[in-house]
Image (cartoon, rainbow, N blue to C red):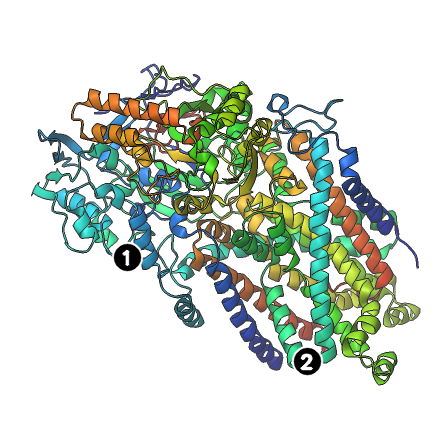
Amino acid sequence: MLLVLVRRVGNMVPTLAAVIALIFVLFSVIPGSFMSGLGDDGRTMDPAVMERMRKEMGLDQPLLERFVKYAGATVVGDLGTSFRTREPVTKLIAGRLWPSLKLTMAAMLVAMAVGIPLGFVAALRPGSLIDTASMVGAVSGLSLPKFWLGLLLMYFFALQLKWLPSFGYGDGGLTHLILPAIALGVSPLALLARTTRAAVLDVLNADFVRTARSKGMSERRVVTWHVMRNALVLVVTTVGLQFGSLMGQAVVVEKLFSWPGLGSLLVDSVFQRDIPAVQGCILVFVLFFLIINTLVDLAYVAIDPRIRYG
Amino acid sequence: MRLGANTWIGGGLFAVALAVAVTAPWIALTDPVMDANLLNAELPPSMEFPFGTDAQGRDIYSRVVYGAQISLTVGVVSQIANSIIGVTLGLTAGYWGGWWDDFVNGLTNVMLAIPSLIFALAIMAILGPGLVSLLIALGLTNWSYSCRIARAQALSLKSQGYVQAARILGYGPFRIMFTQLLPNMLGPIIVIATLGMGGTILAEAALSFLGLGIRPPFPSWGSMLSDARETIAIAPWVSIFPGLAIFLTVLGLNLLGDGLRDIFDPQATTRRA
Amino acid sequence: MKKLMWLAAAAVAVVGFGTAEAQQTPQTQTPRKGGTVRMTAPYGGSLTSLDIHTSPRAQDDIAGKILHRTLYNWDSAKGQPALELAKEVAVSGDGMVYTYKLLDNAYFHNGRRMTADDIIWSYTRIMDSTKGFPGARYVRFIKGAVDVEKGAAKEISGLRKIDDFTVEMTLAERVNPGFLFFVGVTAILPKEEVEKGNFNSNPVGLGPFKFVEHVPGSRLVTERWEKFYKPGKPYADKVIVLIMGEAAARDVAFRNKEIDTSILGPVQYVAYMADPVLSKGILEVAEMFTRSMVMNQASIKPFQDKRVRQAINHAIDAELIVKRLAKDKAYRAVSWLPSSSPVFDKTMKPYAFDPEKAKKLLAEAGYPNGFEFEWTTSPNESWGLPIVEAVLPMLNRVGIKAKAKLIETTVLTETAMKGTFEAYIGSNVTGPDSLSTLKCFHSKTPRTACNYTAFNNAEYDKTLDEAGQASDPEKQAELLRKANAILYDEAPVWFFNYNKAVMAYQPWLHGLQANPTELAHQYPEDLWVDERSPVK
């Protein structure tokens, strides 16, 4: 177990280093600048002021020098100073992390609560109407643009039925969370339903289940004991992979629902060319993905002791 | 080989979309760009304008028809690019191993770790909105799954008898990779590409929503839908038709992908996240 | 004291020209104390900074008007700047020295009273030679400010404290300081709080509401400042600013009564006007923004010919675009100065839509078969791509082939400043100071400052120089009108429209003013909500 952890953490280092270098290069060639962006609503910027800002932000220094500085600081956890707020990027990100996590977890909960049972039911009667209907239904959710789905949810649940607030974070309560969580949760839901169905089907046809059946174990016990446990490995993998990338996928949903997460911070920062904040956000997404994947691996080993890492 | 309902429905939907795209110049009623007439703005569906008109007074039917060209081009071209990159990297990595394998593995890890929509967003911001930028943004950022599959297959196949035999016969590594290994992994790769195509069309819509999609001169479904989002309550037809076009096409691709997977790869059904 | 205007809960707004008249309501309704006002920040994403000196964006000044105060304010009733932090001002005979008697009851939210030192410190900070504060362009008009900017002096020589509540300002150039110091980026801030280093998270100002909480990207919560200097104000207990860049989502939220104000785009404007209930809560104003296609004379040859530029103005049916695409949420532009400018010449008529004349002018200029150009545009719905898409066929009809090139709004300013375009469509602030607005076409104004067309006309320069020297306001107005008429004839841009800003408000919200410099900028001490407001 410990070995797995050490190996995985060790593997993260080159990935992170590559990501740091990559995003630096990408965003150093982006057209437009924070300074010119300040004048984007028709209020022109003063050239002398822009020049001073450039200096203040260190953008006048040679690229290589900036990279060395940036990479060095990143290693010790300093993500630089946001152009917009002139405060540490880590502070900006800290404020957005919890809303982001909350949305991601809620979306994952929605996906699991609906997707897993759906896949399970479908697998028990393969080829039946229930099977086809639930799979087409799940895939339908996957086939809608997220902003469109979100808007439809807003219109229906907020405006027509008046059940839920349509936007925003509110005081951080549950009611504001539901609609964005559904909008975000629909695509992992579909994938989870498919995975569960496939995993259950695989196991149902496996030898040891047939053996259990032939031994006279009741169908219900077969399903609960053998199938559940063995399918769990695959489901956990999917959940983990989805969860790891979901935070980064939340961009559109966060923008639509004015949700103060990392996704909307990232988009705002890209459009305003607040490069340190952009780099910081991407780094957090990547780190989150890597950490979740490591946890998935650990869970793997815990659930199924047969899996060994050489 | 049994074709499931998925395959038929999905394949059918996709075939219709393809047919529309190919025949667009003949089945469109008007030019989707130059036939703007503000006097006809936002008319509901009628005989003259079967899907109604948009805010610029353009025929939505014609735009949806031409939009198929753009959206499918985006989907197909970028998935082909992804598959070529992924397969080439994966095959060579799996076959040669060594430092190259380590390098490709590292690269794949990086691509997997950066959310692809965000990667695409960054590339769009750098290159500026437009069709070519979009093809680059979506065609370069989504190859990690096909790469992984190609690599795994190459690893498991390269020790098999017929590959060994080919080597003894003096086949060069590329000849072995592309004539012996590649045909054996085409199935899963096509599945990944089919499913990825749907994802790409949705990604185009998402980028349009964020203000970084393709724009003039031709319409894409994503940008049409994104432009129409404010009129959802007052002129619903402006958004319904491009929305339906996206939905049905992506649904078709997803069902087709699922169906193909059942055919090609009945065991491993879960690798794709 | 400024005359207050109340908005009738059930009256349709009157469009203000120059003196923006919001509708007068019967004085029977006395403002209610208490309640919460929920405003929206509609322009894109999260607030840049609550240190208002650092950001000139309209979005940020919505919060700025709540937390902070400037020496002057915009008086929408009179259509001019009015003293805000001073009781009176004495002006020297040559118009160069202004002596302000400051308020002696203005308190920062930390309880300290504002004095002359705060004015001097704030303006000096803005000129900091090591930092870029956007307000420098305004403070630079004070004598000696440039020396501070260059690092040659520590203090602005033109600012002198006479006593705690009297400050003397000597100008470097003859301008109306009201136009300079009503702008949010010149707010007066308390030195001791700014120097703590976390001002963005703990902003302290002179405004009517003090800071409570900021959830970046979501909302700003403020509560009544009891020691605010206007007696009996503010009315509301709380003002909340909700950040909502997405118009479609804002529409749902407004209809769902989750927000009290919303800025409307053309599409929603039509929908709201057609709605029997929503149409009763619409406030409109002619804003001081001119939308135009800027033609870069330094790029391609055809644009150097006046006849070509006139032809373009004749070839486009701007009236139709304003009506159909902008849904009448704009006023047809005549020349550069907006109709809300005090020197706007109402007798001038916009370029007539006349494709035949356009073709004739093109032929005279030597382009009988038209020409091609690349048209840079942002995705903006009111002055971006949709407009371009509608114009392309119109230009095509007179033989001009334009090719649209889409860029992000963020890149547009940079493109304009660098001159890397043939033509671009954009929106420019064209007020409230008409003289400085027109200076953008003076040949001495560099491109980076705002002469994006590379306009160079000797007669225009002369007229504008004279206007700058004129001491008689009447004479100056006359000269400015003349300069604006030259621009009309020379047509350095395609004159498209002046923005009509439209705000929807809930029936329980009162006290909005039709601010033509930016409708989203409300002075929140005047706002109040009646019992019908759903939030307690």
Three-letter amino acid code at the position of disc 2? Tyr
Q: Quick check: A141 left or right of C89?
A: right
Q: How many marks?
A: 2
Which residue appears at 72% of the width and 43% of the height? B69
Indicate the secondary structure of the residue bearing disc 1. Answer: loop
Nearest the viewer among C84 and C305 is C305
Q: Chain of mark 1?
A: C
| Contact (Cβ within 8 Å) of mark 1 with mark 2 | no
Q: Quick check: C317 left or right of B111?
A: left
On residue B103, the disc is none
Separation (CA) of disc 1 from disc 2: 50 Å
User: Percent from the top left, x then y, of residue C413?
Assistant: 42, 44
Three-letter amino acid code at the position of disc 1? Gly
Note whether C502 is above or below A255 in the view shown: above
Q: Quadrant of residue B227?
A: top right
Q: Quick check: C246 left or right of C349?
A: right
Q: Chain of mark 2?
A: A
Which residue appears at 71% of the width and 51% of the height? B75
Q: Which residue is mark 1?
A: C197
- For the N terminus of chain B, the quadrant is bottom right
Note whether A310 is above or below C67 in the view shown: below
Q: Which residue is mark 2?
A: A309
Nearest the viewer among A168 and C226 is A168
